[in-house]
Amino acid sequence: DAPVASNFIRNIIDEDTRSGKWNGRVETRFPPEPNGYLHVGHAKSIHVNFGIARDYGGVCHLRFDDTNPEKEDTEYVDSIIDSVRWLGFSWTRPDDPAATAHLYYASDYFERLYRLAERLIELGRAYVDSQSAEAMRAARGSLTEPGTPSPYRDRGVDENLALFRRMRAGEFGDGEHVLRAKIDMASPNINLRDPVLYRIRHAHHHRTGDAWCVYPMYDYTHCISDAIENITHSLCTLEFEDHRPLYDWVLEQLAEAGEFSRPLPQQIEFARLNLTYAITSKRKLLQLVNEKHVDGWDDPRMPTLVGLRRRGFTPESIRLFCERIGVSKADSWIDMGVLEQSLRDDLDPLAPRAIAVLDPLKLIIDNFPEGTVEPCLAPVHPHHPQRGNREFPLTRESWIEREDFNETPPKGYFRLFPGNRVRLRYGFVVECTGFDKDADGKVTAVHCTYFPDSKSGTDGAGTYKVKGNIHWVSAAHAYAAEVRLYDRLFSDAHPGAGGQDFLAGLNPNAKRVVPAYLETGARALAPDTRVQFERHGYFVADRVDSVPGRPVFNRIVSLKDSWGK
Ligand code: ATP
Ligand code: MG
Ligand code: MG
């Protein structure tokens, strides 16, 4: 990977190292909620959290923030584990001989969280509120108006404890009571106006089943989970900045009560990733899947990690992208071109070259002897001659691109048209002599003659000056494949901006399926193998649908960015 650039988070950690605050310990965590598949925005967070832990010899915990039973599922847990591994990160400390997996679930802390909530009640720092949800909302006040204290705010400790225990015991229905922190109803920060810590939900949880009917809120769970796991730096996105005082308040109360020792974990916020021509909201991604605008979470058009993987993005290219965009304190938009260029930069030095003829048209060399096979050579990689040559045969009939022939060529067209000469790349110079049409006027074959002394790499080649150089595959040797030409999922750079429905920005041409003929050597490419099809871009053999004998290739990205900036 590229050398790591410094950033404000690393500066804070460096300062902590100098001051000895954590005795050199660096422990971070990535805390996804298992209510959907990870997307490219999460990749940034993963890269920040796991990358920092790795670089400081620490460990990053993978922690499932699973406190909303209705929305969560083990399907998502499994996929998240898979995606983080695929990106190349590990939740095991590199020098730990026992290889302890730092994989956690907030639901494993339910009992501890519950007891700590009782502690807060005993300390007079939490109370059971029995107002309706609407009444509570109305009493919260606004940015300009202070909130109104609940009539239940001064319940005694014993009454609160008894009620909270009955809440746990399942004696009440959903929404009848909540547990709230007792902080300050007049605070200018609305998050501190007696936030809810627990709510009643008679719902089945994917891990704890029906053991619980009270579930802790995110703000309460998160800071305590960090403290339980001895997290040093709790790195999260900017929308949590206003929640930091609550994070600190909860841990402060519990530290004063002797439940946690100091120093307490420090929350640090950074800007989330917004990517143009994409969306990074789980809710909207779910909508795309549910309404069948895409073929599932791993549709190659999706900005999910399973989608990017299937599209053909490498983990290296995504890490390179995260390195390039860096970490900052201010929200901004990153151009999709940066992600695509990272893929090109990763694959260009590696990907073997091959020929794919898309939308094929027959080319017949009328003076080429029937049954003759002329071997031609092309480099596996133009910049690495040591990787050798690929051999592909020229025969009397070839497949060329339909767009490489034009009956009535526009000005500046240098490819095949009657009377014009072009080079068959790596082969001979040919001159177009005519073409066949079917009853509908569609061109079905192009005829030409070749010059036997013009072969690439021979002395005669230089005497032919042609402007066009087209690619081809022998019709007798090529094999048919399905090629899926993917492009950006949205044609709108900022889908949904200006209050518009984000679905209006969908790109109807983000997937085009075309027939193709591939050079013989590409036949052996296993699923997930990446290749550059000359002229067309980078492709991967689809990990789901490509099977031997019936190959399917996805275009990951074209060779050049054709989207206007
Ligand atoms: P969404 O808003 O899409 O539902 P989320 O933030 O609720 O996402 P979580 O599963 O809670 O999803 O996210 C896990 C972590 O990933 C959080 O720490 C969150 O800050 C971070 N994260 C989510 N989206 C982005 C993003 N676009 N850029 C950077 N980090 C992100
Ligand atoms: Mg979240
Ligand atoms: Mg969310």
Image (spheres, grey):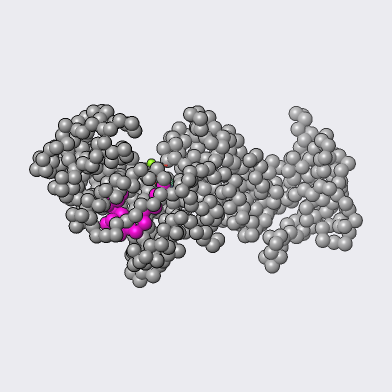
Using the image, determine if residue 14 lies above or below residue 412. Answer: below
Residue 74 as seen in the image, left or right of residue 541: left
Taking the magenta stretch, the answer to whether it contains residue 222 is yes
Front residue of 100/377: it is 100
What is the count of numbered marks? 0
**The C terminus appears in which quarter of the rendering?**
top right
Q: What residue do we see at 76% from left, 32% from top? A: 442
Front residue of 214/335: it is 335
Q: Is residue 478 visible?
A: no
Residue 345 as seen in the image, left or right of residue 435: left
Q: Position of residue 453 (x, y in %)?
A: 88, 57
Front residue of 413/316: it is 316
Q: What residue do we see at 21% from left, 33% from top? A: 149
Q: Which residues are magenta?
A: 221-237
**The N terminus appears in which quarter of the rendering?**
bottom right
Q: Position of residue 67 (x, y in %)?
A: 29, 45
Q: What residue do we see at 65% from left, 39% from top? A: 564
Taking the magenta stretch, the answer to whether it contains residue 412 is no
Q: Position of residue 194 (x, y in %)?
A: 24, 39
Front residue of 16/44: it is 16
Tell me the quadrant of ligand 3.
top left
Q: Is residue 249 visible?
A: yes
Q: What residue do we see at 68% from left, 44% from top? A: 358
Q: Residue furthest right?
A: 463
Q: Position of residue 474 (x, y in %)?
A: 74, 51
Locate residue 523: give its quadrant. bottom right
Using the image, determine if residue 239 lies above or below residue 51. Answer: above
Residue 311 as seen in the image, left or right of residue 189: right
Locate residue 35: give its quadrant. top left
Residue 474 as seen in the image, left or right of residue 422: left
